[in-house]
Image (cartoon, rainbow, N blue to C red):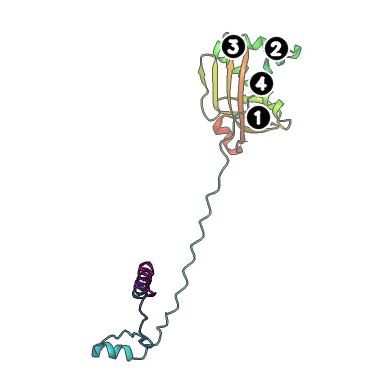
């Protein structure tokens, strides 16, 4: 018997050889060794002027001149002294002249007031109120007389009297006085009063101002 190869065996053998050849062709080829890679160096071409500048020794540092100290700011000028404002008028809440006139010892004063004209009567009532209020305000004063026109005439407006230049006598001395007096509509009683006591009046001014001395 002849030993004939099976057609399937030949076909299989051919197929395996074909696949082997294809796989060999698909393998990546080995890289050639090109030796160590050279290091690249950048080179700049200088002009003669640039070369001279680059090789010149560095100049010594310039020392800065010391700065002059800044002048100190001048101290602020002291502010002007503040003087106290004009003293406020004293405004008592209780009127005193009516009680003084109601005293039995004031019988003659009540009789004298009835003899005065309306304006003069109001002035006398305000003078009396001024003396009572000053005495009540400060025990050191013992007013015994008021002149409402010592340095300026008093002003009468209806039943209001303003005496900005008055003076009063106490313990043999004269003192400047300012007051404003409000009387009732009939002018027979004081219903409002405010005053301000000033400095003593110089003795050499008494005669000029019509302020009699007490001997």
**Which of label 1 and label 4 is nearer to you?**
4
Q: Which mark is residue 169?
A: 1
Placement of the N terminus among the 4 image quadrants:
bottom left
In x, y percent, where is residue 190? 62, 15
SS for callout 4: loop
Region rendered in magenta: 1-17
Looking at the image, which residue sits at the far front? 1
Within 10 Å of the Cα at label 3, are there few (<14), some (14-19), or many (20+) other Cα atoms? few
The answer to which of marks 2 and 4 sits earlier in the sequence is 4
The answer to which of marks 1 and 4 sits earlier in the sequence is 4
Q: Which residue is mark 2?
A: 108
Within 10 Å of the Cα at label 2, are there few (<14), some (14-19), or many (20+) other Cα atoms? few
The answer to which of marks 3 and 1 sits earlier in the sequence is 1
In x, y percent, where is residue 85? 56, 38
Q: Which residue is mark 4?
A: 93
In x, y percent, where is residue 181? 58, 20
| In the image, residue 86 above or below residue 134 | below
Q: Tags 1 and 2 in contact by the CB under 8 Å rule?
A: no
Q: Which residue is mark 3?
A: 184
Q: Tags 1 and 4 in contact by the CB under 8 Å rule?
A: no
The residues tagged by marks 1 and 2 sit, at their Cα atoms, a distance apart of 21 Å
The answer to which of marks 1 and 2 sits earlier in the sequence is 2
Q: Main secondary structure of the magenta part?
A: helix
The residues tagged by marks 4 and 3 sit, at their Cα atoms, a distance apart of 15 Å
């Amino acid at each position: 018997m002849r030993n004939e190869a099976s057609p399937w065996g030949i076909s299989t053998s051919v197929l395996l050889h074909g696949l082997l050849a294809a796989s060999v062709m698909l393998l990546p080829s080995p890289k050639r060794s090109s030796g160590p890679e050279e290091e690249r160096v950048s080179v700049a071409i200088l002009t003669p002027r640039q070369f001279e500048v680059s090789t010149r020794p560095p100049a010594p540092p310039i020392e800065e001149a010391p700065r002059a100290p800044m002048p100190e700011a001048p101290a602020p000028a002291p502010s002007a002294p503040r003087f106290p404002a004009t003293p406020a008028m004293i405004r008592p809440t209780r009127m005193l002249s009516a009680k003084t006139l109601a005293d039995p010892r004031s019988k003659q004063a009540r009789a004298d007031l009835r003899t005065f004209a309306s304006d003069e009567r109001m002035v006398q009532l305000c003078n009396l109120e001024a003396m009572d209020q000053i005495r009540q305000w400060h025990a050191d004063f013992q007013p015994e007389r008021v002149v409402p026109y010592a340095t300026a005439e008093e002003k009468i407006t209806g039943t209001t009297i303003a005496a900005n230049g008055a003076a009063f006598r106490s313990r043999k001395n004269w003192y400047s006085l300012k007051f404003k007096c409000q009387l009732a509509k009939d002018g027979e009683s004081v219903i409002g009063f405010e005053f301000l006591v000033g400095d003593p009046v110089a003795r050499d001014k008494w005669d000029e101002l019509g302020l009699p001395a007490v001997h």
